[in-house]
Amino acid sequence: MLSLIQKILSCNGYSIYGAQVVAYGAYTAIKRLCDKTPERFVVSNLDGNPNEIEGIPVSTIETAHKDGLMIIAVTELLQDEIAATLQKNGYRNVFKLTAHEEHLLMREYFKSVGKFPCLDNAVNNPPVDLVLYEVKNHRDKPLENHPQLRAFEQSIQAGASITNARIAPILDNTGENISTKNKQYCEMSATYWVWKNTSHPWVGIEHYRRHLLVTPEMLNNDIDAVLPLPYVCYPNTIAQFLRFVSGDVLSALLSVLKTLHPDKYEEYFAILNGQYQYTYNLVCAKREVFDNYCEWFFNITEYMETLKVSEVSVTRALSYVAEVLTNLYFMSNQDKLRICHVEKSIYT
């Protein structure tokens, strides 16, 4: 039994710190796995957060039950600071839902509902020819615990054309590239470079602070793509998208999807109104799948660039569009591709 589930079953009530995707996913999984609901969702500030989630109140730390279990379910990058604040305010029973604990919890949840199968990291197949590209940018904050790259991982600098700084051996401004658009596309300018300038049979994209815990020995010809487990969004993925962009960007995206893919539009719209979302554009796939994904993806974003939506041309809106598109591509191909899932590790 998971250690978190054991704690919940033995405690006198619990609350969840957080009110966004990590928190909602944890709530959904716990409710399914042990039929226990939290007393409340707790946040530091109510601004930008819902007043309630499925009838459960969202409130600040002053109102929560301090003797119960408090599960910190936000990005791991903020958990130590939040734990310290909770302890100063009298909370003694605190559980940090780290990226690893979150993966274990959501893996069990998805297993229980028969969705999103995970790869076994103990598998020892003959290794495939895989290169994982770790995307870095000159604006990245220094990390205290960045791991040594494995033999099949290489660093690539995204946005190399917009700075004189050099932080990786591979630059995304060589060959065929969109490096000058990095401020709009973020890590996807490196994805474009990999698509246009490499030919490995297996290829993947990860970030300097988020790595996919996959190895060449875990893969075989029966697998088409490997992704981290999706988040569970409340109330749907459109609401999650609109936390970061305006309605104009959403309208532009829907217009382009309807124009370029009229036969798939209803399916795409249903996915957007669903709750499951792959995030961060972390992808590992066979070459033919990766190439097809990129061709489909950049065809849509390049069309969006032609529309007169100022937010698309002057901000990083396309990087948020990118997450939506990555999600749409792989969710809409669940019946055509064998997609497996692995843990993602977060470094601080």
Image: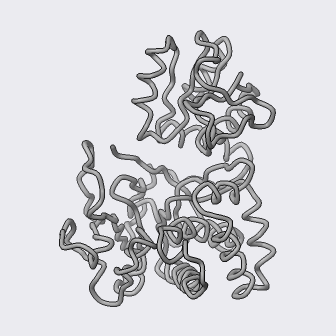
Residue, x 61% and y 42% (percent of image)?
106
Which quarter of the figure is the C terminus placed in?
Answer: top left
Which quarter of the figure is the N terminus placed in?
Answer: top right
Q: Nearer the viewer, residue 265 or 82?
A: 82
Q: Is residue 347 above or below residue 3?
A: below
Q: From where the camera sits, is residue 108 visible?
A: no
Q: Is residue 249 above or below residue 242?
A: below
Residue, x 72% and y 85% (percent of image)?
261
Q: Is residue 216 left or right of residue 69?
A: left
Q: Quadrant of residue 268?
A: bottom right
Q: Quadrant of residue 165?
A: bottom left
Q: From where the camera sits, is residue 240 visible?
A: yes
Q: Nearer the viewer, residue 260 or 255?
A: 255
Spot occupied by residue 208 in the image (x, y as percentages of width and height)? 33, 57
Q: Is residue 271 left or right of residue 157?
A: right
Q: How many marks?
A: 0
Q: Quadrant of residue 248?
A: bottom right
Spot occupied by residue 246 in the image (x, y as percentages of width and height)? 63, 64
Spot occupied by residue 15 in the image (x, y as percentages of width and height)? 64, 23
Q: Is residue 231 above or below residue 134?
A: above
Q: Is residue 161 above or below residue 37?
A: below
Spot occupied by residue 53 in the image (x, y as percentages of width and height)? 74, 37
Colour approach in the figure: one colour
Q: Is residue 339 left or right of residue 146?
A: right
Residue, x 46% and y 28% (percent of image)?
82
